[in-house]
Image (tube, helix red, strand yellow):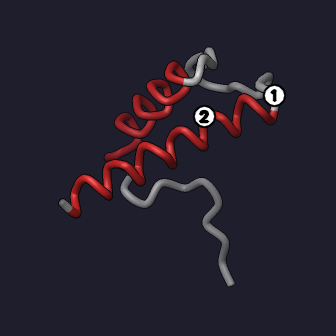
Amino acid sequence: MSRRGNSIVVPEAREALERFKMEAANEVGVNLKQGYNGDLTSRQAGSVGGQMVKKMIESYEQSLK
């Protein structure tokens, strides 16, 4: 079984996903920089990812209305 990891299914979406990530990080008070952010704590990275998922779920729920 092949594992995809963090690959983007639609490469054209890369810039939009990067903006989305930066927006989510800003909302939870995490300062991201362009490129590598390996200095983030697990809590900070989790906060950004969690905020992204929350916003995606909200967007999906809005589309169901």
**Image x and y of residue 58, in percent:** 37, 49
**In this picture, is 6 found above or below 43?**
below
**Image x and y of residue 10, in percent:** 36, 56
Residue placed most toward the observer, 3 or 24: 24
Residue placed most toward the observer, 7 or 51: 51
Question: Residue at 37% across / 34% down in the picture?
Answer: 15
Q: Which part of the image, by quadrant, shows the C terminus?
A: bottom left
**In the rendered view, does 12 fall on the left or right side of 31?**
left
Q: Mark 1 is on which residue type?
A: Thr
**Image x and y of residue 26, in percent:** 51, 19
Callout 1: SS: loop
Which residue matches tag 2?
A: 48
Question: Residue at 60% across / 43% down in the picture?
Answer: 50
Q: Mark 2 is on which residue type?
A: Val
**Image x and y of residue 18, in percent:** 45, 33
Residue 41's tag is: 1
Question: Residue at 50% across / 41% down in the picture?
Answer: 52
**In this picture, is 45 found above or below 56?**
above
